Image (tube, rainbow, N blue to C red):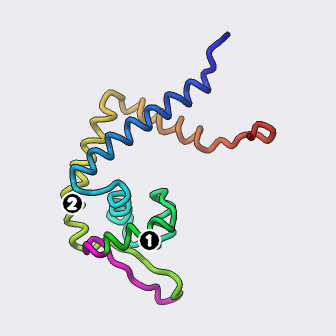
Amino acid sequence: MSENLSLKSFVVLMKSSKSIQEQIKKDISKHGMKTSDFTILEALYHKGRQTIKQISDAVLINTGSITYVIDKLESKNLLERSNCKEDRRVVYIQITEQGKTVMDDIFPKHQKVIEEIFSDLTTEEKETLIDLLKRAGKKEPERGNES
């Protein structure tokens, strides 16, 4: 029987993803943070002021859980809320100066860890990997193949 390359690709992707996530989690915890704290701060650090919905979409944390994390980060003065003047239902979240200082220290170190993880790949291989993962991630199963 021939090897199913789609299944093998899936298994290798999942194992690789798990390994990378564990390395990232370990790195973030060295800085006294949980992954959810770091990902929210990182989104605000790079993208600026965001709504809770925008943050939730960017960091893949559901809006129910994200409020709890935002509350914790706000109590540590790492981020702050501000109301939208045009729509009172909308609340913006932005990183504070203290939060920027923390991320100015942590993020370059974190980026070096990520660069080390991918150091065995050439620039061309990284570009190919990005393209392949994007294409696989956008593919919808055909009707009839759904479980």
Q: Few, some or many C-alpha atoms within 10 Å of disc 1 (few <14, some 14-19, many ≥20)? A: some
Look at the picture and state if 139 lies above or below 49: above
The quadrant where residue 79 appears: bottom left
Say what amino acid the circle numbered 1 marks.
Answer: Thr
Q: Which residue is mark 2?
A: 104
Q: In this rendering, is residue 99 above or below 142?
A: below
Residue 125 locus on image (x, y percent): 42, 30
> Foreground residue, 19 or 85?
19
Q: Which residues are magenta?
A: 75-86
Q: As rendered, which of 45 and 16 lies closer to the eye?
A: 16
Q: Which residue is mark 1?
A: 67
Residue 28: percent from left, percent from top: 28, 50
Residue at the (27%, 47%) spot, across then down: 111
- Within 10 angstroms of label 2, few (less than 14), some, or many (20 or more) residues? few
From the image, which quarter does the N terminus lie in? top right
Q: Secondary structure at mark 1?
A: helix
Cα distance between the residues tagged 1 and 2: 24 Å
Of marks 1 and 2, which one's residue comes earlier in the chain? 1
* Relative to 76, 123 lies left or right: right
Residues at marks 1 and 2 touching, judged by CB atoms closer than 8 Å:
no
Tell me if residue 85 is in the magenta stretch. Answer: yes
Magenta stretch: residue 76 in it?
yes
In this view of the protein, which residue sits in the foreground, 98 or 129?
Answer: 98
Give me the residue at 34% from left, 61% from top. 37
- For the image, the number of numbered tags is 2
Asked if residue 39 is positioned above or below residue 95 in the image, the reply reads above
Which residue is rendered at x = 26% and y = 46% of the image? 27
**Residue 8, percent from left and from top:** 56, 24
Residue drawn at point x = 39 percent, y = 74 percent: 93
Q: Position of residue 147 (x, y in %)?
A: 74, 40
